[in-house]
Image (cartoon, grey):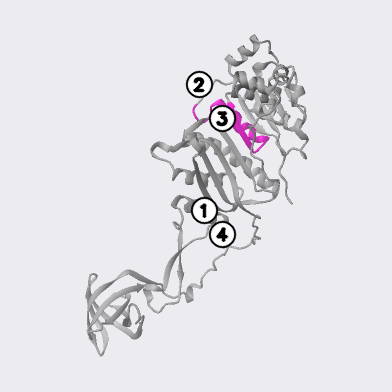
Amino acid sequence: MSRLRPARIASVRTDPAVDDAAEDATGNATHRLAVALLAGSPRVAVVGPGWSRVDARGWDRRGGEVALAHTLQQAAQEADFGHVRVGVADTAVVADAAAAVAGESGIRIVEPGGAREFLAPLPLSLLPLSDELIETFRVLGLRQMGDIAARDVSELEARFGPDGVRAHQLSQGIDARVFRAFDAGEAPETALELDPPVDTLEPLLFVLRHLLARTCEELADQGLCAARLELDLRGQNGTETGVAVPARPTRQERLLYDLCRAALERTTGPGGRLTTPVEEVVLRVARSAAPDARQEDLFTRRWRDPMAAASALSRLGVRLGSGGVVRPTVRADHRPESRSVWEPVEIGYGSCMAEPEAPDEAQTPGVLHLLSEPQPLRVRTAEGRPAEMWGDAGHHELVAAEGPERLSGDWWKDPYHREYFRVCTEAGDLLWLFREYRPSGTFRWWLHGWWD
């Protein structure tokens, strides 16, 4: 039975080494820090410039929270951020305060259950309260968090209303801002909360590339490939847009990025503008599969890469939408034009695995090409067989004719009665004609196709 992992949050504060104004929309420092911190966790939330929060769960077997803090520090420094401070605690308010007062090492970890004791001597300025309320508390002699926590909550509520109750809760480390609990056995999922929201595709793709890198790392750790991705774009006022991305089982980051980009481009307006500003991006592996492997023969002359074909089909399927990639298939039907139908191609590795055998050219039969619509003809017969024809393709003498091959059926819906002939013109063209009898007893000639 799976279990939900207890909440732990890491707060990361930095001094950006690069001015935001000097960078374009796809590389601003706010988003650069957030995507860099994906190295430590699949869930990151932007708080402000040089400040993000990270879901700190999942490091029990990877060195614990100290190892997580060092990983986050290193990731931020490699992204050109200086003076990186990391705080880890049960709630966001405690983690933020821990990062603010982190010592020389830049790391401060508050053990579970130790929030109130840790916060008590800290100044109220570290709480997310208005400057006006903090100044009022100061005038009343309440300067530390422990001073607020020691007061009776009903007294604070009577005097300051909901703001007083919130201040009392925060001073004890009680904070409702947590990452969504996730099941220890669920498929890989990465998420990034954006502040400010983005309203164009370009910065969204910048974030997406790093989410995919993180997802592919997790898939590799589990020995799996992604067969279907889901993108949730969560906007303001609770709006949400879901984008499904089918693929052959793969963990190739570049391929998955191309597929996601193509799917997103189909949902955007002119200039790559999103329908609503996006506050959070969630990338989920909706279906995973074991990686496929195939043994090839080094000395085989005719070797094809089925992976390349499957990749091409995946890209086409996403760009063209459901049913956009089709292939012909044969079904049982006496009427020639109804024997072949187009069916959607199931995007997957297996659909491209079969290696076609090289045909024996000495025994290769002619290929029949049917016209999309039969063309009417005038035909002169001799001894019951076609001898001369006139139509859109001009006038032709027929030097040979075989037939007839009689076909009829579908009396219950669309009855037909035909006599087919294979004919050869004086130029050597092999044509397929038929004479169609009507219920009135008359008939008409048609050109139905030709052979190569």
Residue at the disc numbered 3: 31
**Considering only order in the chain, which callout, 3 or 4, is on the residue closer to the N terminus?**
3
Please count the marks in the image: 4
- The nearer-to-camera label among 4 and 3 is 3
How many residues crowd mark 2 within 10 Å: few (<14), some (14–19), many (20+)?
Answer: few
Q: Amino acid at mark 2?
A: Ala
Residue at the disc numbered 2: 21
Q: Residue at x 68, y 23 (%)?
A: 153
Could you tell me how far apart the alpha carbons at marks 1 and 2 are, in whole angstroms? 39 Å
Residue at the disc numbered 1: 314
**Considering only order in the chain, which callout, 1 or 3, is on the residue closer to the N terminus?**
3
Element marked by disc 4: loop
Q: Amino acid at mark 4?
A: Arg
**Considering only order in the chain, which callout, 2 or 1, is on the residue closer to the N terminus?**
2
Give the residue furthest to the bottom: 383
Q: Amino acid at mark 3?
A: His
- Left or right: residue 400 compared with residue 294: left
**Considering only order in the chain, which callout, 3 or 2, is on the residue closer to the N terminus?**
2
Q: Is residue 120 visible?
A: yes
Seen from the viewer's position, the closer of residues 145 and 400 is 145
**Considering only order in the chain, which callout, 2 or 4, is on the residue closer to the N terminus?**
2
Q: Amino acid at mark 1?
A: Ser
On residue 304, the disc is 4
Could you tell me how far apart the alpha carbons at marks 4 and 1 are, in whole angstroms? 17 Å
